[in-house]
């Protein structure tokens, strides 16, 4: 029934689209009317505390759960019960399950199931990951099991890779290796990666878009760089006293104004150029424009929406 | 092929770091005009950063005429003296701050000049000790 | 990238193959047990002993004729029935093991296979396994009898054997329904056994109360207790076609429930699943009839059961008990459930009892009472 499962071309250009997606487990609303779009060849970070709905979202994208309301679309088609779509989607959950007990057997298993399996890529990854092909998977630590699962998933050459807490339990070397591999796949094979995590720091330098989930609702989706530059922290010292209203009059959107002795700390939602323009006129003795970490940006963005941040970022 | 350095912990957006790094490398002569820059794929997979980030950096650099693209081949460093203009702007800003600071402290302009020359000499000596080549800075 | 995938994509054959592969060693184990129980046992008994034992009682005796068994074969057949029962439980559980682990369900639901193929593949693998077990045993047993020159015995027995095979498949299909519905393997087995026991016991008691037990109406009695059908044919005649109809019926039900089963059921106790209160009336019925009959027998044994108030007191008490026990055992959280959800199954069970008793009285003539 084409009219029900396929939609306009513009939506097909998006790899993954959630359309007023809801998932209820009895009275619990894990996801509530979430709508968003993820473009191909991007690395998307889904952030939220425990129980925010991240894993539920990933499972809906993988076609494990059936939506209670709304739709989850892969390239414009409904994912649930769609074997063709699932050929191109790989889901690595936080507790991977293996049908067989060694990587070797699992590679054979995946090879028989997934048409996109790339044996050469598999062997290359095997050399990079610190895993032995005949090691017992059930004897490995959780982190190693996750690595094995990610390896098997990437070797299937998917278009969409869904990772639930992928970087947890990885040592820094392995983390960097994984990033390199994913970056290459994104550049070469137009892979789209969707990573769910509670750890902002991990995602901060890797994702190009982030979405924040809280209690089943999607608070916002934004390009990461835009988010980072949307708020600026300034440290300055002036020869004459400068007040907040001074700066506001000159057109700066001040979020926070603090003085520490002769040093002024400002948080502003204005561009760097504008800030420089305005502050230069006051002949600053010291002017430092500091970027905020993603966590700090979230804190301020959300405090503006009056969410208690301790609830969100565990 | 020279790869730029980025610091993941600094908090500065990576695409800005890339741009700054390329500018610095060009200023230092580590890459010369018409040299080929690493491809998006190479840079992303070598450093483990998002290819879209690299794409963004290259896109902006192209708009700012720092680099130019040859279809089917890649990105190349432009041959424009403007490269130094941005560095000079930055330097001018720092000088302005130093000047104001000096006036406030009652330091005369001559002393300020002496301070600058002294600093340059010190830095040159430090560089010489490391055995690096003189790239024409300070001459 | 979405090119002509459907032509070479793995499908039913793949699921069947993988499922069968996983069951293989268990299948061979039970096949071996079957062989031990019949042909090897026969060989151990030896031709001469066999003929001696059978000479005075053989297939011509009316006692054995309808059941197609003889003095030697019936205990061996009983053994086969027992092994079959265990085989169904073990093989079906093995085939659906991954259904009850959340991470396994995650994996399997995200695989590029529709639920139809996943169900059919697994079900067919189970079918194939049992076909193998029964066929191999039949072949070897045939060889033994052929070697002894008593092929006629084998052919007479084969009717009983086929009845056992049909009953096994019926039990298998019935079990699949509960495997598909349940959240944990333990609950699947528990509920499957529980329902069968509840049904058989309740019907037995109702038939007893209404004096309709002498001509055992086996078809109703074993409707929801297919496990019994593995053994009943040893003693009593049984309708041949019913098994086949029930196999189809249970298979379709199992398929339906498999398709509808959401991935989030994995690992959840049955008591917390939405369909559980629908099954609880069976346990209410069980508790009611058991306690009612017990109490009646204890205090007012001479009276007719249905006219004795003691029975009804026991019935109600037993109904309550049945509800409570089935709630607690199934992991339903008593604190969280609304009272209505607990009361309704009790009322449902009692209504069930009234309906069944009424239906039985209407549709069947009572046996002539000795007193």
Image (cartoon, helix red, strand yellow):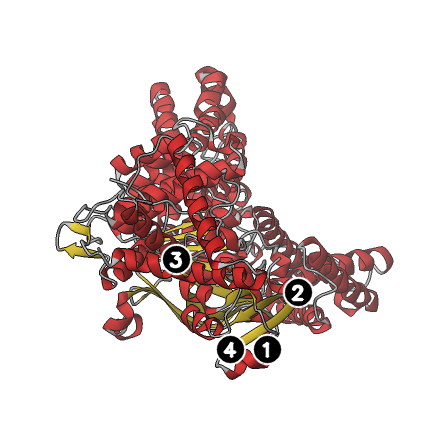
The spot of residue A119 in percent (x, y) is: 26, 36
Q: Mark 4 points at which residue?
A: A253
Give a yes or no on whether discs 4 and 2 share a subunit: yes
In front: C142, or A284?
Answer: A284
Give a yes or no on whether discs 3 and 1 share a subunit: no
Seen in the picture, residue A213 relative to C216 is either above or below; the reply is below
In front: B126, or C190?
Answer: B126
Give a yes or no on whether discs 1 and 2 share a subunit: yes
Instruction: Chain letter for mark 4, please.
Output: A
The spot of residue B98 in percent (x, y) is: 49, 59
Q: Mark 2 points at which residue?
A: A260
Give the mark nearest the N terminus, 1 or 2.
1
Would residue C331 appear left or right of B92 to someone viewing this image?
right
Q: What element carries label 2?
A: strand
* Pointer 4 with pointer 1, Cβ within 8 A: no
Q: Distance between the residues labelled 4 and 1?
A: 10 Å
Give a yes or no on whether discs 4 and 1 share a subunit: yes
Q: How far apart are marks 1 and 2 (CA)?
A: 14 Å
Instruction: Chain letter for mark 3, please.
Output: B
Q: How far apart are marks 3 and 1 (CA)?
A: 28 Å
Q: Nearer the viewer, mark 4 or mark 2?
A: 2
Q: How far apart are marks 4 and 2 (CA)?
A: 20 Å
Give the mark nearest the N terminus, 4 or 2.
4
Q: Mark 3 points at which residue?
A: B91
In front: A18, or C146?
Answer: A18
Give a yes or no on whether discs 3 and 2 share a subunit: no
The spot of residue C267 in percent (x, y) is: 57, 51
* Pointer 3 with pointer 1, Cβ within 8 A: no
Q: Mark 1 points at which residue?
A: A244
Residue drawn at point x = 39 percent, y = 26 percent: C141
Give the mark nearest the N terminus, 4 or 1.
1
């Amino acid at each position: 029934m084409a009219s029900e499962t396929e939609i306009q071309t513009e939506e097909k250009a998006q790899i993954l689209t959630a359309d007023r997606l809801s998932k209820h487990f009895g009275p619990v609303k894990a996801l509530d009317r979430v709508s968003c779009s993820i473009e191909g060849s991007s690395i998307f970070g889904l952030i939220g505390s425990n129980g925010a709905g991240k894993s539920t979202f990933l499972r809906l994208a993988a076609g494990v759960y059936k939506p209670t309301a709304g739709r989850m679309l892969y390239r414009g088609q409904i994912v649930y019960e769609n074997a063709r779509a699932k050929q191109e989607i790989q889901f690595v959950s936080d507790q991977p399950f293996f049908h067989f007990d060694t990587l070797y057997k699992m590679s054979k298993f995946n090879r028989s199931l997934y048409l996109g399996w790339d044996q050469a890529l598999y062997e290359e990854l095997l050399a990079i990951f610190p895993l032995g092909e005949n090691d017992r998977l059930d004897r490995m630590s959780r982190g190693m099991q996750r690595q094995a699962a990610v390896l098997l998933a990437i070797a299937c050459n998917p278009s969409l890779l869904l990772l639930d807490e992928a970087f947890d339990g990885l040592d820094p070397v392995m983390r960097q290796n994984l990033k390199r591999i994913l970056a290459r796949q994104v550049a070469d094979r137009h892979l789209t990666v969707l990573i769910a995590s509670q750890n902002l720091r991990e995602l901060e330098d890797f994702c190009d878009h982030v979405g924040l989930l809280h209690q089943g609702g999607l608070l916002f989706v934004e390009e990461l760089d835009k988010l980072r530059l949307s708020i600026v922290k300034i440290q300055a010292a002036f020869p004459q006293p400068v007040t907040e209203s001074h700066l506001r009059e000159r057109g700066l959107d001040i979020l926070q104004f603090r003085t520490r002795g002769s040093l002024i700390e400002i948080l502003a939602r204005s561009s760097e150029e504008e800030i420089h323009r305005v502050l230069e006129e006051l002949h600053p003795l010291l002017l430092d424009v500091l970027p905020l970490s993603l966590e700090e940006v979230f804190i301020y963005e959300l405090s503006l929406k009056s969410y208690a941040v301790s609830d969100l970022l565990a | 092929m020279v790869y730029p350095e980025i610091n993941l912990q600094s908090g500065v957006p990576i695409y800005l770091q890339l741009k700054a790094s390329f500018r610095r490398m060009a200023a230092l002569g580590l890459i010369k005009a018409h040299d080929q820059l690493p491809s998006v794929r190479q840079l992303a997979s070598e450093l483990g950063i998002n290819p879209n980030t690299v794409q963004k950096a290259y896109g902006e650099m192209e708009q700012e005429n720092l680099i130019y693209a040859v279809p089917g081949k890649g990105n190349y460093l432009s041959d424009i003296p403007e490269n130094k203009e941005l560095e000079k702007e930055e330097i001018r800003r720092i000088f302005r701050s130093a000047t104001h600071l000096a006036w406030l402290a009652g330091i005369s302009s001559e002393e300020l000049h002496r301070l600058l020359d002294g600093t340059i000499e010190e830095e040159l000596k430090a560089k010489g000790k490391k055995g690096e080549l003189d790239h024409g800075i300070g001459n | 990238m979405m090119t002509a995938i459907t032509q070479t994509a793995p499908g039913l054959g793949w699921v069947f193959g993988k499922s069968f592969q996983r069951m293989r060693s268990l299948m061979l184990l039970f096949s071996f047990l079957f062989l031990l129980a019949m042909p090897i046992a026969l060989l151990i008994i030896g031709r001469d002993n066999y003929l001696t034992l059978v000479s005075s009682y053989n297939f011509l005796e009316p006692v054995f004729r309808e059941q197609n068994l003889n003095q030697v074969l019936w205990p061996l057949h009983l053994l086969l029935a027992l092994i079959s029962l265990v085989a169904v439980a073990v093989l079906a559980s093995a085939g659906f093991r991954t259904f009850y682990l959340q991470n396994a369900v995650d994996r399997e639901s995200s695989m590029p296979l529709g639920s139809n193929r996943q169900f059919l593949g697994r079900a067919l693998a189970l079918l194939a396994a049992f076909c193998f077990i029964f066929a191999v045993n039949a072949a070897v047993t045939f060889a033994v009898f052929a070697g002894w020159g008593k092929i006629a015995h084998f052919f007479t027995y084969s009717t009983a054997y086929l009845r056992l095979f049909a009953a096994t498949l019926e039990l298998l299909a019935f079990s699949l329904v509960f495997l598909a519905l349940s959240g944990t393997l333990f609950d699947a087995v528990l509920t499957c056994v529980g329902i069968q026991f509840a049904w058989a016991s309740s019907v037995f008691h109702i038939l007893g109360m209404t004096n309709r037990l002498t001509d055992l109406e086996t078809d109703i009695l074993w409707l929801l207790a297919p496990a019994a059908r593995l053994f009943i044919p040893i003693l009593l005649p049984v309708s041949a076609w019913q098994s086949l109809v029930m196999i189809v019926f249970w298979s379709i039900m199992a398929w339906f429930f498999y398709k509808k089963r959401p991935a989030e059921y994995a690992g959840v106790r049955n008591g917390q699943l939405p369909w559980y209160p629908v099954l609880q009336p069976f346990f209410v019925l069980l508790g009611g009839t058991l306690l009612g009959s017990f109490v009646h027998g204890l205090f007012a044994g001479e009276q007719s059961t249905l006219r004795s108030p003691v029975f009804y007191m026991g019935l109600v008490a037993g109904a309550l008990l049945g509800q409570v026990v089935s709630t607690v055992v199934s992991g339903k959280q008593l604190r969280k459930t609304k009272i209505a959800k607990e009361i309704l199954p009790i009322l449902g069970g009692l209504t069930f009892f009234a309906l069944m008793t009424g239906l039985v009285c209407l549709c069947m003539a009572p046996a002539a009472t000795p007193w």
